[in-house]
Amino acid sequence: MTAANALTKFPPFGGVGDHDDTDMCPSGYYLVGAKIRSGSWLDQMALTCAPVDPATGATGLAKDVLPPRGGNGGGPSSGTCLPGFIIHGVGMLMTPGDRQVRLMIFNCVSTISADRHNLDLGNNAPVFPNIVQSCPAGEAVVGIRIRHGRHVNALGLICDSFEQITVKPPPEVVVVDCPESGDEVPTEWSDMLNAHNERRAEHCAPKLKWCESLAKSAQVYASQCIVGSHDKNIAPNTGENLANAYYFDQNGTPVLPALSDRDAFEQSWYCEIANYDFNNPVFVGGFTQNCQRVNGHFTQVVWKDTGFLGCGRATCEIDGHQGTQWVCRYRPAGNVNVSDPFVLSQQVHKPLQPGQECR
């Protein structure tokens, strides 16, 4: 950010001073306070700026903009807004003749609400500031133009865009409780369940039953669009497979969903069978593209002791494109004790050859 590109620039108010400098917060930072030297007036000041987390509104580690402007008189002090607050304006009290800045009262405003508080820096006085500079709505302070010499003579705020952050509520907590007989599978998910069970039959694994509460928990996570990362708060003893894809028609319009559920299943999970050695079983977890190297999604799909399935899907941004994310969850979880080849051999069976039957 440069002063030339800023939306609002207040002309410095006060004395002429010997120097005229414009100090800006680093890009992505906002003014949260200052370090000063002062006595009867401000002798020196340096801006203190901090970044704002766009998801939570929290202010990060603050930085001072150096060098400080002014002289070395007076005593040192400093101040910053409360955490989660940034500066939207200032009231200034000047010395007689408006030669120096005597007091700054910064207007600290919450990044997520209308809450505010004052931050006073300088020589306090029992009178209100007579000079006020306030950023327009939708802006916050990102810099200050300072006229100075041996003292701080004049200040002019520089404001740029800042939209108050709306903090997303925590995701719904879904209690997973799968009835022994399973739930009726919704029509829209019958193909995904059938795709699982057809492949499981080839590996002599029992059919999965649909679990509506498991599906609801999967949908909650899918809708958060956290791509390529498992849910850290998933219920105990629950397995999870993730897939995502994007696809465009000949006009460049995103096709949604990007794949059928069966194609997402085959092309993202079951295809990993090519990476699994049934004669020397080794589990390889992780995420890759085009079913390369890993096999943990495949092993979860055909894990013999898993009995329930529930899935969700959502439209999300995938690699900068509008696409689809799938989340399928499994109870009991597969991929347990996978460092033991015997466990793998008992849970992940070879596919039947023509004419073979399950024993």
Image (spheres, rainbow, N blue to C red):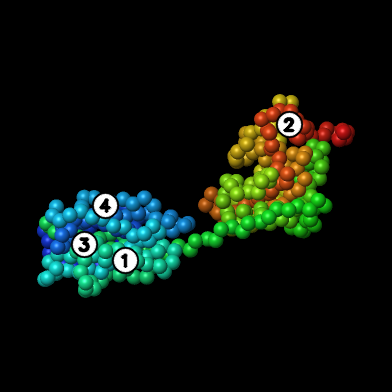
Cβ–Cβ under 8 Å for marks 1 and 2: no
Cα separation, mark 3 vs mark 2, equals 71 Å
Residue labelled with disc 1: 118
Q: First in sequence, mark 3 or 4: give its number.
A: 4
Cα separation, mark 2 vs mark 4, equals 60 Å
Give the number of the mark in front: 3 or 4.
3
Residue labelled with disc 3: 122
Residue type at the position of mark 3: Gly
Cβ–Cβ under 8 Å for marks 2 and 4: no
Residue at disc 1, secondary structure: strand
Residue type at the position of mark 1: Asn
Residue 359, given in percent of the width and then of the height, sits at: 87, 33
**Tag 3: Cα neighbours inside 10 Å, few (<14), some, or many (≥20)?**
many
Residue at disc 2, secondary structure: helix
Residue labelled with disc 2: 343
Residue type at the position of mark 4: Val
**Tag 4: Cα neighbours inside 10 Å, few (<14), some, or many (≥20)?**
many
Residue 358, given in percent of the width and then of the height, sits at: 86, 35
Cβ–Cβ under 8 Å for marks 4 and 1: no
Residue type at the position of mark 2: Val
Cα separation, mark 3 vs mark 1, equals 13 Å
Please, which residue is most extreme toward the top here? 280
Give the number of the mark in front: 1 or 2.
1
